[in-house]
Amino acid sequence: MEIILKQDVQKLGFKDDVVTVKPGYGRNYLIPQGIAILATPSAKKVLAENLRQRAHKEAKLVADANKIADALKALEIKIAVKAGGEKLFGSVTNADIAAALESNGQSIDKKFITSGTIKRLGKYAANVRLHRDVIVELPYEVVAAE
């Protein structure tokens, strides 16, 4: 079953993508929730026209995302957490990285940050998705709090 996504769906696709899903998933979840619409020939024509008109705006969004990416690469992020030796008391998650970015003046939602769960001191890297075409690798360091 082909559908057109109306919003981003994790591990499925981005807004305005035409994707193929199993009929039950599309008919019982995506379409009733308003996440997608059925990809009929007329809907595909409307989508193509909308994408053609939106191409200029998209180029500006990519340029803005690249500016933010350059700013993120220039940052040195250190996250101070309680630790006993090399092991942490707790863990460092995407929310902690988002909070560290917020304190450095960059507001990025935690759902766009992919790093995994960190349980030891050291240097790590997180992927930050600023746009569907712009993904930046953000190095950071986990240090022991005093």
Image (spheres, helix red, strand yellow):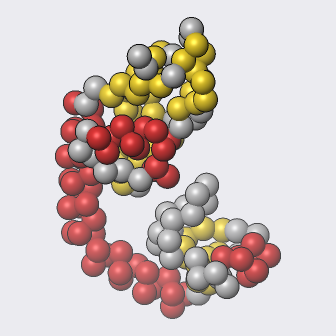
> Residue shown at 67%/85% (left/top)?
32
- Quick check: 112 left or right of 49? right
Q: Residue at 21% across / 54% down in the picture?
A: 64
Q: Position of residue 82 (x, y in %)?
A: 51, 22
Residue 83 visible, this orientation:
yes
Q: Quadrant of residue 85?
A: top right
- Front residue of this view, candidates 76 and 84: 84
Query: Which percent across, then down, holds residue 110?
Result: 46, 49
Q: Choose top left, top right, bottom left or bottom right for residue 38.
A: bottom right
Q: Residue furthest right?
A: 24
Which quarter of the figure has residue 79?
top left
Please determine whether, in this image, residue 44 is positioned above or below residue 93.
below
Q: Residue at x 36, y 82 (%)?
A: 49
Q: Please identify the residue farthest to the front as the structure is shown.
A: 146
| Residue 106, above or below 46 | above
Q: Nearer the viewer, residue 106 or 71?
A: 106
Decide if residue 120 is in sight here. no
Residue 11 position, x and y percent, is: 61, 55
Tell which of 142 and 36 is nearer to you: 142
Residue drawn at (23%, 44%) of the image: 105
The quadrant of the image that shows the N terminus is bottom right
Up-down: is 118 above or below 13?
above
Instruction: Tell me if 115 is positioned left or right of 68 in this view.
Output: right
Q: Residue furthest top?
A: 85
Left or right? Give the position of 4 relative to 50.
Answer: right
Quarter of the image for the C terminus: give it.
top left
- Disc tally is 0
